[in-house]
Image: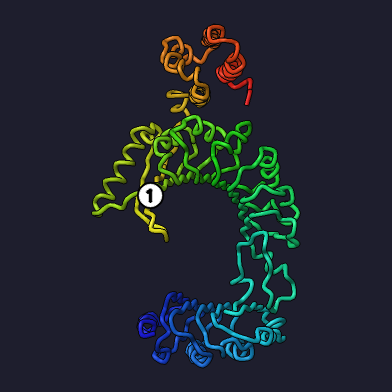
């Protein structure tokens, strides 16, 4: 409190004061009247506060109109009548008091007077270890087990539901009997009974979708149709499966994309699928070191990309501070060297180390691209469809053992390079040639592998002809 006195004595015209993590050791030391303070946010720690000490504080705040209080308290801090005397001049009053108590019903009843319910319309909820204002300090996140507080002065339970903005679907929602009208974030951790989501959630208000389980394409399309405001998508499940399910559609509404699933290897075809499915992404966040070699290609393909964040997990922290600068600079230089996009753009970057509660170290790298590359750049270097087809052909050549043996000869042959580079009808004669060679090998190897080769050849031809045929 001595520090608070010093602050207020040097800023006599101060009208708003926010104090967090402050100690309440000697409240008597706060003797200076704070004549102009209209708004006070006070989060205290350590020693519990008594109602007498709070009364002394309020006497030093004659012009206070808005108060937010978070503290440990003595039992006398839970009486509605005591707070009623001190808070009559306040316009807003939100508090969260941690205190162990019995007779919870009697405590809640003291906040059901006309002053609280009608004049001020301030509501409280109570648990065995605390008393708090609602909905200000109510939960904002719910799941299938959601229930409003058992003891509260609220007469309409919709007050709690309207404060929920994040819902986690962790199991079947068949038992939910509440309706959430202001949902901003939806996390899918269970695909069971997804069709019931619209029964208890206003899907049109959702802006962020988190996918943490495998979902069928039909259900994905159904959800996206019901979420016109969706801007952010976070994929916490197998990204290759998700892209396989959504490869027929373009999700142009997604501007913020977060991927928390590591790839098994540097699969450039997945990056091509990603960029084709989400062409309008502006912010990209990736949480795996295994994506390191794929970032430059993603930067090139996503023309609207302006913010890239990469988290590298389980890395040893540098022993000396200058090592961090060296690691970050080296990685940024690698990205710039491989991403031709950045050579034609103004960009800035920042990197730092952090660790979680399990002492796992993370290296975080942010890159801001401040100027977009002209459209002519993409047409000059590598058209998008050409890159997509190339990696798709390469991906399917590696899916079969025998095609994998032919892969080096096919991709390195001058005929393939010439025909692929032209992207003209003349180049398509090479596809029947591949079919002829592979069918000839089928006859040599035997009838047993005939179906396998036929399927892969059909896929290969379909890809080469611009994806007109799809055998997935």
Q: Nearer the viewer, residue 245 or 25?
A: 245
Q: Quadrant of residue 201?
A: bottom right
Above/below status of 158 relative to 107? above
Task: Tell me where residue 432 appears, x and y as whole percent.
Answer: 56, 9
Q: Seen in the image, is 194 located left or right of residue 5?
A: right
Q: Which residue sits at x=63%, y=61%?
A: 142
Per the image, label 1 sits on a secondary structure element best described as: loop
Crowding around mark 1 (Cα neighbors within 10 Å: few <14, some 14 to 19, many 20+) is some
Q: Which residue sits at x=68%, y=87%?
A: 106
The residue that mark 1 highlights is: 314
Task: Tell me where residue 321 appears, x and y as whole percent.
Answer: 25, 54
Task: Tell me where residue 296 appears, x and y as whole percent.
Answer: 41, 35
Above/below status of 29 relative to 70? below
Q: Quadrant of the C terminus?
A: top right
Q: Seen in the image, is 448 located left or right of residue 344?
A: right
Above/below status of 282 relative to 93? above
């Amino acid at each position: 409190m001595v520090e608070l006195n010093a602050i207020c004595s040097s800023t006599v015209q101060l009208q708003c004061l926010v104090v967090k993590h402050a100690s309440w050791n000697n409240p008597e030391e706060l003797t200076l009247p704070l004549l102009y303070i209209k708004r006070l946010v006070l989060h205290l720690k350590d020693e519990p506060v008594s109602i007498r000490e709070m009364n002394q504080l309020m006497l030093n705040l004659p012009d206070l109109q808005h108060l937010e209080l978070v503290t440990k308290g003595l039992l006398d801090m839970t009486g509605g009548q005591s707070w009623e005397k001190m808070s009559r001049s306040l316009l807003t009053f939100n508090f969260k008091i941690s205190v162990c108590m019995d007779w919870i019903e009697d405590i809640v009843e003291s906040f059901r007077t006309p002053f609280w319910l009608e004049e001020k319309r301030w509501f409280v909820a109570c648990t065995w270890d605390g008393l708090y204002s609602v909905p200000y300090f109510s939960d904002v996140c719910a799941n299938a087990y959601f229930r409003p507080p058992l003891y509260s002065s609220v007469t309409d339970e919709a007050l709690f539901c309207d404060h929920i903005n994040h819902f986690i679907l962790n199991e079947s929602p068949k038992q939910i009997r509440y309706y959430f009208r202001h949902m901003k974030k939806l996390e899918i951790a269970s695909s069971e009974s997804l069709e019931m989501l619209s029964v208890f959630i206003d899907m049109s208000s959702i802006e962020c979708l988190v996918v943490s389980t495998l979902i069928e394409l039909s259900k994905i399309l159904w959800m996206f149709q019901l979420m016109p405001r969706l801007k952010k998508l976070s994929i916490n499940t197998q990204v290759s499966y998700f892209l396989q399910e959504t490869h027929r559609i373009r999700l142009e509404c997604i501007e913020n994309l977060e991927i928390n699933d590591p790839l098994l290897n540097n699969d450039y075809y997945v990056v091509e699928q990603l960029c084709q499915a989400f062409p309008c992404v502006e912010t990209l966040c990736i949480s795996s070191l295994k994506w390191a070699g794929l970032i430059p290609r993603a930067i090139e393909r996503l023309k609207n990309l302006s913010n890239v964040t990469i988290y590298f997990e389980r890395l040893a922290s540098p022993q000396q501070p200058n090592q961090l600068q060296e690691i970050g600079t080296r990685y940024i230089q690698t990205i710039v060297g491989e991403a031709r996009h950045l050579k034609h753009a103004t960009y800035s970057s920042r990197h730092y180390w952090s660790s979680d509660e399990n002492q796992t170290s993370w290296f975080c790298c942010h890159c801001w691209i401040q100027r977009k590359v002209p459209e002519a750049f993409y047409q000059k270097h590598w058209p998008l469809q050409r890159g997509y087809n190339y990696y798709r052909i390469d991906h399917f050549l590696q899916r079969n053992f025998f095609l994998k043996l032919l892969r080096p000869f096919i991709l390195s042959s001058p005929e393939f390079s010439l025909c692929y580079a032209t992207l003209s009808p003349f180049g398509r004669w090479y596809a029947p040639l591949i079919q002829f060679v592979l069918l000839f090998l089928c006859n040599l190897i035997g009838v047993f592998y005939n179906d396998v080769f036929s399927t892969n050849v059909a896929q290969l031809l379909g890809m080469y002809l611009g994806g007109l045929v799809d055998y997935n």
